[in-house]
Amino acid sequence: MSSHSAEEPVFDQAPKSPSSRSLRGLDGLNFLMADVRDGLGPFLSVYLKGTQHWGSGNIGFVMAASSIAAAVFQIPSGLLVDAIRMKRLLIAISGLLVAAGCLLIAFFPKLPTVLAAQITLGAASAIIPPCLAALSLGVVGHRLLPARISRNEGFNHAGNFVAAVLAGGLGQYVGVIWLFYLICGFAVASALVVLLINPAEIDHELARGTGTPDAGGHHRPMAWAALWKKRDLRVFIISVILFHFGNAAMLPLAGQVIAKVHPGMDVVALSACIISAQLVMVAVAAAVGYAMHKGVGRKKIFLVALAVLPVRGVLFSMTSSPYAVVAIQLLDGVAAGIFGVIAVVIASDLMRGTGRFNLAQGLMALAVGIGAALSNVTGGLVVEKFGFTTGFLTLAAISTLGLIFFAVCMPETRPEEDRAATPGAPPRDVILTS
């Protein structure tokens, strides 16, 4: 009986009106956490290849270790965020743990140490995406969430842009070691900015997508077995795995190509890749939010992101020029910019009324981790045996499989009441209020 009530849809009775301070807190948190939640990312690959002279296999191994650790902790993280109210504290602690792991890699760049640190980074970073999504939903509500997620991603990519500019300058003129200190600075700042979000404005039941209360006034989340019977959720999770399986290793492998063919240009070229992609992502995130407000379906938007990946992989296989690599990386700005917004919104659509929104965030992040781990391991091994060209083409083929699977199997998830929403009350107005 309780599971029935949990499955009933829940809709916001009226748009929420969060304070400017809380909204600015979300802005600042997404800006600063952009660099923290991903750790060193592709810069670790360049650092280990160019400075420490590691082989591609070991690099892929330690990068996969972080993804696997994050994957293991995703579901517990989602359950934790659903269950407790100390979401702001969780984000702050996770960010500081990422900073500690980066310092460990910087001072002790040996395989056992880097492996242990990467596992710690993966575990700590697992909490951040579902916690950010939960805070956003709890503060603004379902109706305003698409515009809020679009804005979150805009600030996230702007943060990545600033971090990449700083990383490129520091890495080129001061030393790669300063990249590690940069992440620490962002982590400490994020732990302070999270205090701007007013805890009284966080609806913790709404933050986990809880349905209608039962006869006793209790909110009962959907049972795990019933949740996994949702075919659209299973299709979505598999699609996310395939997206990242085809995508995650492309930029690290491109960085290794540059480090091998054009030594000395690796850090600055990789910074240029990230900077250019982040600029595109800022615009794409805003465009996705606008498209959703105008009624474009979630499925069509995600298909665009999936279609870009095979093109990018084929183009990477055809060149080793740093300038061409930077230009090709603009396509990642399109694909990743779309995914960052639309994936959270689709998860919110699928989980309305279940009380399992953050568990779904954990499942999605688990899928991202599995896909990224498969991508890095597969890409590294294929490159070692057959070369970079074959490695990129392999990832392009996997991306094509993801495109076909999503196009054939995934339904549209946009709720009916959103389709019938009056156009005179654009949800972005509230989100963008100063």
Image (cartoon, rainbow, N blue to C red):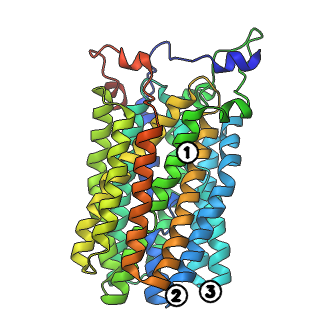
Q: Secondary structure at mark 3?
A: loop
Residue where numbered disc 2 is placed: 55
Residue at the (26%, 66%) spot, across then down: 328
Taking 135 as reference, is 146 left or right?
left
1 vs 2, front mark? 1
Q: Looking at the image, which is closer to me, 217 or 187?
A: 217
The amino acid sitting under disc 2 is: Gly
3 vs 2, front mark? 2
Taking 417 as reference, is 284 left or right?
left
Please identify the quadrant where the C terminus is shown.
top left
Residue 425 location, quadrant: top left
Q: Secondary structure at mark 1?
A: helix
Q: Looking at the image, which is closer to me, 305 or 181?
A: 305
Residue 306 is labelled as none
Residue where numbered disc 3 is placed: 110
Q: Is residue 434 above or below residue 246?
A: above
Q: CA distance from mark 1 to mark 3?
A: 35 Å
Residue at the (52%, 62%) spot, across then down: 372
Residue where numbered disc 1 is placed: 237
Few, some or many C-alpha atoms within 10 Å of disc 2 (few <14, some 14-19, many ≥20)?
Answer: some
Whichever of labels 3 and 2 marks the residue nearer the N terminus, that label is: 2
Q: Position of residue 423 (x, y in %)?
A: 28, 16
Taking 246 as reference, is 430 left or right?
left
Please identify the quadrant where the N terminus is shown.
top right
Q: Position of residue 362 (x, y in %)?
A: 61, 45
Q: Is residue 53 above or below residue 160?
A: below
